[in-house]
Amino acid sequence: MHPWWKDAVFYQIYPRSFQDTNGDGRGDIPGIISRLDALVKLGVTALWLSPLYPSPDADNGYDIADYCDIDPRNGTLADFDELVAQAGARGIRIIMDLVINHTSNEHPWFQASRRREAPYDDYYIWRPAKADGKPPNNWTGFFMGSTWQWDEVRGEYYLHLFDPKQPDLNYHNPAVIAEVEKVMNFWLDRGVAGFRCDVITMLYKTSLKDGSGIPILRGIENYKTQEGNHEILRQWHRDVWGPRGAFTVGEAGLVTLDEARDLSLPDRGELDLIFYFDHLEVDRLLSRYGPKPFNAAELLRRFTSWQQGLDWNAVYFENHDQPRIVSHYGDDGRYWAMSAKLLAVLLLTLRGTPFLFQGQEIGMTNAGFTSLDQLDDIESHNVDGLLKSFHLPRRLRWWIIRNSSRDNARTPMQWSAGPGAGFTTGTPWLRANANTNWLNYDAQDDDPDSVLNFYRRVLQWRRGCEPVMSGNFEPVYSDRAVLAYRRATDDGQACTIWLNMSGKVRRPKPLGAQAGRIVLSNSGRPELDGTLQPWEALVVAGN
Ligand code: TEU
Ligand code: CA
C-alpha cells in the first residue's frame, strides 16, 4: 500500500507570522487562504498548521484553552472550514497540531481540577508538598527550573514539563485518553487529514521518583518513550487513526533510533512518521544550545544512521522551534543563495517525506537580534535565567542564545519589501527581519535564479526522479566539509549527490572518478571536473 503521505510535500505554517489580513499584526486564517496559490506554485501538497486554538499565549498557542474551537485572533471555525475547502480544491491536505501532553492552565478542565470537581479532579498530575513544603521530586523541565507549581486553590503541586501555565495531563486516567479521542474526531470530522503530534513521546509518566544527574531535564528517564506511552499510541491508532485513515507525524524529542523504530515501524500500529533532532545538533553541545564546529562527516554519519534505520520517515531542517537552516548550516553572508540552494538539494534528495517551514523556500535567515529584550520566546528567557544562575556573564549568555532562540524562525514571513514585509499593514507582533528590504517573496517570484525558483525547480524535478522518490540511501564520501551519498532503485537507476558545505574549493578524490551526467546543480556547471566550488551542490545521474 502506497500511502499519500509518501509522495507529499509538507509545508508548516506558523499562523501568527504567516499573513495578516485585518491589520492587527498577527497572521490569521484568511491570510493563509490568500496565499494558497503561492503554495501550489511552490509544489506544496499538504499543510501542517501550528496551533490555531484559543490560547492565552503563554507558549504562543502551545498552551490550549479549548481544543475544539479557533482563537478569534486567528479567525472562526467557519474560516477554518473555508480553508479546508479552498486547500482541498487545490489538492492540498491539512494536518493540525495536536498538543495534548498538557493544556493551558486556563482550560476549563484545569480550572475544575484545581477545585477537585469530578471527573476533572484526576485529569492532571497533582501531589502534596513534601514534609518540608518542597515539590514532590527534583525534576527539571524543558523551560528550565522545577516541573512543579504550587496551586493555592487545591493546596497541592501540579506537574508541568514546560511552562507553569502548561499543566501536564494525567495519562494514567482513561478519561483523559478518551477526551483526546473526541478532540481528534472533532477535527477529522471537519476534514483534516491527520495530526502533527506535539511532545507525543512524553505523555506517560511511569513514576514520579527523583531523577539523577545534572539539573537539566532531570527525571526524564521516568517519562521519555515509556511502554505506557506506546500503549496509548496503539489505542489511538486502533480507535481513531487506523479506522479513519488519519496520518500522524510525532515530535519525538531526544529519541534514539531504536525508540523511533518502536514508535513508527508500520507493524507497530503507532505513528506513521516521527521528527527526530539528531541531524540538527551536529554543531551543538546540548540540544539547540552551545555552538561547536560543524563537521559534514558527522552530519552524513547521523543521516546514514536514520535513513537506513527507518524504512521511511519525515525529513526536515526547519520548524517554529529551530533557527533558520541557511544561518545554521549554511552561510547567510557571502554565499547566502548558493548555500540556501545546497540545503534545498540536501533536504529534497534525502529518502523520506520532506517538510518545509514557511520562509525556508526564500532562504529566510536568522533574525539578527541584538539583545534578549527583543525576544518573545519564553524558552530563550528561561535559558538566560538558568545560565545566569551558573554566573555566566551576559555577553556569553547572549552568544549562546542569540542564534539558537526559537524566535529566529518566528519573525513575520517576508512577502515584500514594503513596511510590515507585506505581512501586515499594522505593527507585527514580532518585528520583521531587517533584510526584508531585499530578501522577500516578491523579489524572487519572477527571478529565475532566485532561491524560491530553485526550490520550485527541485520540487518538480524530484517528482520525476525515481531514485529520489523511492530509492535507497548509501553514504559515498565525507570529510569535514564535503559529503556525498547515492540514491538507487532496485532496478539500477541511481544518482549521486555531492555537496560542498564550505566556502572553499574542494577536490574530494572519489569525485575525480565519478562518472555520469549532472542532472541538477546550484551552479549550472555543464560537466564534472573533479572539483566542487564553494557551497556547490551536484546531482549526478548514473553510477
Ligand atoms: O516542542 C517540544 C520541545 O521543546 C522538545 O521536544 C525539544 O524541542 C526537543 O527535546 C529538542 O530540543 C514542542 C513544540 O514544538 C514547542 O513549540 C512547544 O513550546 C513545546 O512542545 C510545548 O508544547
Ligand atoms: Ca490578523
Image (cartoon, helix red, strand yellow):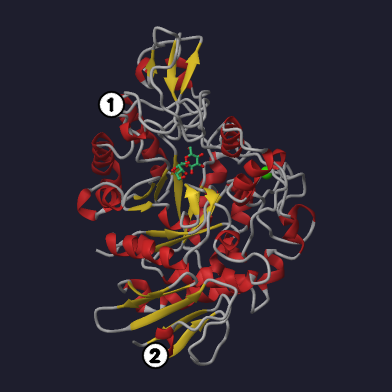
Q: Is residue 535 left or right of residue 220?
A: right
Q: Residue at x 25, y 48 (%)?
A: 262
Evaluate whether residue 28 shows in this view.
no
The CA span between labels 2 and 1 is 61 Å
Residue 85 lies, in percent from the top left, at: 50, 53
Q: Furthest residue to the right? A: 419
* Above or below, 158 relative to 519: above
Quadrant location of the C terminus in the rendered image = bottom left
SS at circle 1: helix
> Label 1: which residue?
174
Q: Is mark 2 within 8 Å of ligand 1?
A: no
Instruction: Residue type at mark 2: give it.
Output: Ala
45 left or right of 336? left
Give the left or right position of residue 392, taking residue 118 as reference: right
Q: Residue at x 70, y 64 (%)?
A: 439
Q: Nearer the viewer, residue 211 or 439?
A: 211
Residue 435 is drawn in which quadrant?
bottom right
Q: Do the residues labelled 2 and 1 touch (CB within 8 Å)?
A: no
**Label 1 CA crowd tier, 10 Å (few <14, some 14–19, many 20+):** few
Callout 2 environment at 10 Å: few (<14), some (14 to 19), or many (20+)?
few
- State whether residue 489 is above or below residue 197: below
- Location of residue 294 in the rendering, given as x and y in whole percent from the top left corner: 51, 62
Amino acid type of disc 1?
Answer: Pro
Left or right, residue 339 beside residue 347: right
